[in-house]
Amino acid sequence: YILERSSVIYNGIRETAIDPTPLPTNDARILWLGRLHYIKGFDVAIDAFSKTLQTHPHARLMIAGDGPARSSLEQQVEKYRLGHAVQFLGAYSPEEVYGLINQAIIVVVPTRVQEAFGQVALEASQMGRPVVASHTGGLSEVILDGETGILVPPEDSLAIAQALTWLLENPEAAALMGHKGHHWAHTQFKHANFVNDYEALYSKCKEDTTL
């Protein structure tokens, strides 16, 4: 009875005027974007990047954002001797997000918690970037595993490293994932769909007095 009267409306995301650029072929920049907090799992991602760097020494990591964990993350980078390969970009504005994503070949969302939606992952898909994300919460709906990105167990740095390595070593597959992600973001999560679905639901509730 409840299922018959239930519906799922995905959050919508507004389209951007910025066009996605092709994935870089000679510049392996990986991006982590968000508030620098323990729950976001950036420390796990740095550990993963240190493993990836062993086989891909030219890879570079961009960390965009600020927060209470920044100091400990900087210490972790220094401990692992990754200063030459990791760049802390600091706080960013909403207007800068898509430009940052366009600079990257992969976007990683290594959260420890049940993300309700996964805004960063969807923004990355909008820009045609493959996403490596924790298999948790809404991220498992935003990212199609093996199609628009790769889902990994939370707090598993080895799994993240393996996913990064595979994408770096298979650029055509990475580009295809990005292309599928772009299509997925602009169809399933189109803002107009979000608005129209809510309007239809409200109209149905007004008409059905048993709801």
Image: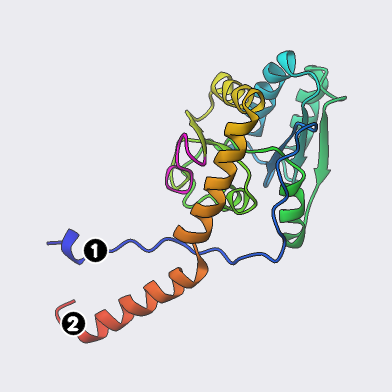
Q: Position of residue 102 (x, y in %)?
A: 74, 48
Please state which of residues 171 and 43 is positioned toward the viewer in this rendering. Answer: 171
Q: Going by the image, does 14 lie left or right of 86?
A: left
Residue labelled with disc 1: 6
Q: Going by the image, does 111 lie left or right of 2?
A: right
* Disc nearer the start of the sequence (1/2): 1
| Residue extending farthest right | 84
| Residue extending farthest top | 54
Q: At 66% from the left edge and 26% from the top edge, which residue is drawn? A: 168
Instruction: Give the residues drawn in magenta, as a range.
Output: 140-148
Residue labelled with disc 2: 208
Q: Quadrant of the C terminus?
A: bottom left
Q: Position of residue 106 (x, y in %)?
A: 66, 37
Q: At 50% from the left edge and 30% from the top edge, which residue is drawn? A: 154
Whole-number angstrom distance, CA of label 1 to CA of label 2: 14 Å
- The image shows residue 33, relative to residue 48, as above or below, that is below
Could you tell me if the residues under marks 1 and 2 are in contact, i.e. CB atoms within 8 Å? no
Q: At 65% from the left edge and 30% from the top edge, which residue is drawn? A: 171
Please state which of residues 29 and 182 is positioned toward the viewer in this rendering. Answer: 182
Which amino acid, by three-letter code, is at mark 2?
Answer: Asp
Q: Position of residue 12 (x, y in %)?
A: 50, 64
